[in-house]
Image: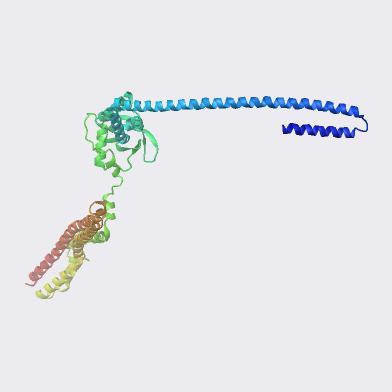
């Protein structure tokens, strides 16, 4: 209303202003008439505005009433839904309890199936049967991850899977599969599966790792591989074969297995390496003595026995002594010849005693290494106990390896010493025999 009055007053003032400005050209009656006409028009406009405001106000009241009515309807609907939700919760609780009662032992069956599937997943994944029939873990993963009772079809498939695993353990079959060779390339090969123990192809053992068949990088010794070849080529139905009961674990350990030379060098220690050096020295001395006595000195002495001309050999030098002193009496000549024989003896027996000493030192040094290794074993037992044999393995290996080195040095050097000593004694015996013969010849010529 205030807005309407303000507009009305503004119009009056505007008319007054117009009237004042036009007072000079209009009469008072004309001016009054125009003012009244303007007022009438303005009143009509104001009345229209008031009517419009009133109609809008009634419409706003109607909208407010409609909104309040809808709010009441929604609140009533919400109350009904809340009551229905509570009723549904009550029914769900009753249904769940009824399901639990009706399931009975089926709940235990669900737990047993999940547990069995979980435990069998690892066995199936590493089983050699999966090398021939890949993708068998899918059903087991489904049963393990399921949060509801398994279906009858899944239970039947699980049963068939377990029967297949059991029956295939006693079967020897041949199939074609991709095999990853040592170079990392995959190629198709004909693979023979012996139960769940071994995979063989081309006369070699294979192993199954994470769903892939691979060539075993380090194969067993030839004695084992020869049976693989015989097994692959047999036609009688029966053949011997080395089996791996650990399903490939033992064959995998072959890659870490050290050869005998590697073990002898790795665990020899100071004592073992010393024995090695002495063994090499003893062998060189023995070989030099064998060559000299058997192929140089021995043949020359034998040849000298058949010749009366003294040569450059032990017997020839004794004969030179005899020829130089043949005019001496028997006693002096005998002393001269004995002196010549004694002079030749060190040359012939040179190095023989050293071989004997080295052969005796080998086991002693081996025993020293054995004692040192056992000291390390007892120290490991003191620090770490006997729970882990690996902590004692180094000391035991050193003890045994040094013993082996001592025996390896003693056995051949003892044999070679016997050979060299026997040959040297035989040559010295020839020298003494020939010296005695020369003395007898001298006595005969002087008698």
| Quarter of the rendering containing residue 331 | bottom left
Camera-nearest residue between 410 and 201: 201
Q: Residue at x 13, y 67 (%)?
A: 435
Residue 329 visible? The answer is: no
| Quarter of the rendering containing residue 282 | bottom left
Can you give x and y, in whole percent of width and height, for residue 401 in the image?
23, 55
Can you give x and y, in whole percent of width and height, for residue 137 in the image?
34, 32
Can you give x and y, in whole percent of width and height, for residue 341 in the image?
15, 69
Q: Quadrant of the N terminus?
A: top right
Can you give x and y, in whole percent of width and height, for residue 372 in the image?
23, 60
| Quarter of the rendering containing residue 310 | bottom left
Camera-nearest residue between 217 and 309: 217
Whether residue 434 is situated above or below residue 124 in the rendered picture: below
Q: How many marks?
A: 0
Q: Residue at x 74, y 25 (%)?
A: 48
Q: Residue at x 67, y 26 (%)?
A: 56
Q: Residue at x 19, y 66 (%)?
A: 314
Q: Is residue 132 left or right of residue 59?
A: left
Whether residue 76 is situated above or below residue 420 in the rendered picture: above
Whether residue 447 is situated above or below residue 48 in the rendered picture: below
């Amino acid at each position: 209303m205030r807005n309407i009055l303000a507009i009305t007053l503004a119009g009056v003032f505007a008319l007054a202003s117009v009237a004042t400005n036009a007072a000079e050209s209009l009469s008072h009656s004309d001016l009054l008439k125009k003012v009244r006409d303007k007022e009438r028009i303005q009143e009509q406009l104001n009345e229209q505005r008031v009517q419009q405001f009133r109609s809008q106000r009634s419409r706003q009241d109607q909208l407010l009433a409609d909104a309040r009515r809808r709010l009441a309807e929604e609140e009533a609907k919400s109350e009904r839904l809340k009551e229905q939700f509570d009723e549904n919760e009550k029914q769900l609780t009753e249904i769940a309890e009824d399901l639990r009662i009706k399931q009975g032992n089926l709940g235990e069956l669900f737990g047993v199936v999940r547990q069995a599937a979980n435990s069998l997943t690892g066995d199936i994944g590493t089983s050699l049967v999966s090398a021939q029939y890949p993708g068998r873990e899918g059903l087991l993963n489904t049963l393990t991850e399921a949060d509801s009772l398994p279906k009858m079809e899944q239970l039947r498939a699980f049963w068939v899977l377990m029967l297949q695993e059991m029956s295939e353990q006693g079967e020897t079959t041949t199939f074609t599969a991709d095999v990853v060779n040592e170079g990392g390339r995959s190629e198709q090969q004909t693979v023979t599966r012996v139960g769940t123990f071994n995979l063989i192809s081309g006369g070699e053992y294979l192993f199954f790792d994470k769903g892939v068949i691979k060539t075993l990088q380090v194969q067993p010794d030839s004695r084992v591989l020869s049976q693989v070849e015989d097994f692959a080529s047999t036609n009688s139905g029966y053949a011997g074969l080395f089996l791996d009961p650990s399903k490939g674990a033992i064959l995998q350990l072959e890659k870490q297995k050290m050869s005998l030379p590697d073990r002898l060098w790795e665990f020899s220690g100071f004592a073992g390496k010393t024995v090695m050096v002495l063994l090499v020295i003893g062998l060189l001395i023995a070989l030099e003595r064998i060559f000299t006595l058997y192929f140089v000195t021995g043949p020359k002495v034998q040849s000298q026995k058949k010749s009366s001309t003294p040569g450059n050999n032990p017997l020839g030098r004794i004969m030179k002594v005899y020829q130089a002193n043949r005019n001496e009496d028997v006693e002096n000549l005998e002393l001269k010849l004995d002196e010549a024989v004694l002079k030749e003896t060190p040359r012939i027996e040179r190095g023989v005693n050293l071989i004997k000493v080295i052969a005796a030192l080998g086991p002693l040094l081996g025993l020293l290494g054995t004692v040192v290794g056992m000291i390390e074993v007892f120290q490991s037992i003191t620090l770490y106990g006997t729970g882990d044999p690996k902590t004692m393995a180094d000391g035991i290996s050193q003890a045994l390896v040094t013993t082996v080195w001592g025996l390896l040095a003693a056995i051949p050097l003892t044999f070679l010493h016997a050979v060299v000593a026997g040959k040297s004694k035989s040559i010295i015996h020839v020298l003494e025999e020939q010296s005695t013969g020369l003395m007898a010849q001298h006595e005969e010529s002087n008698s």
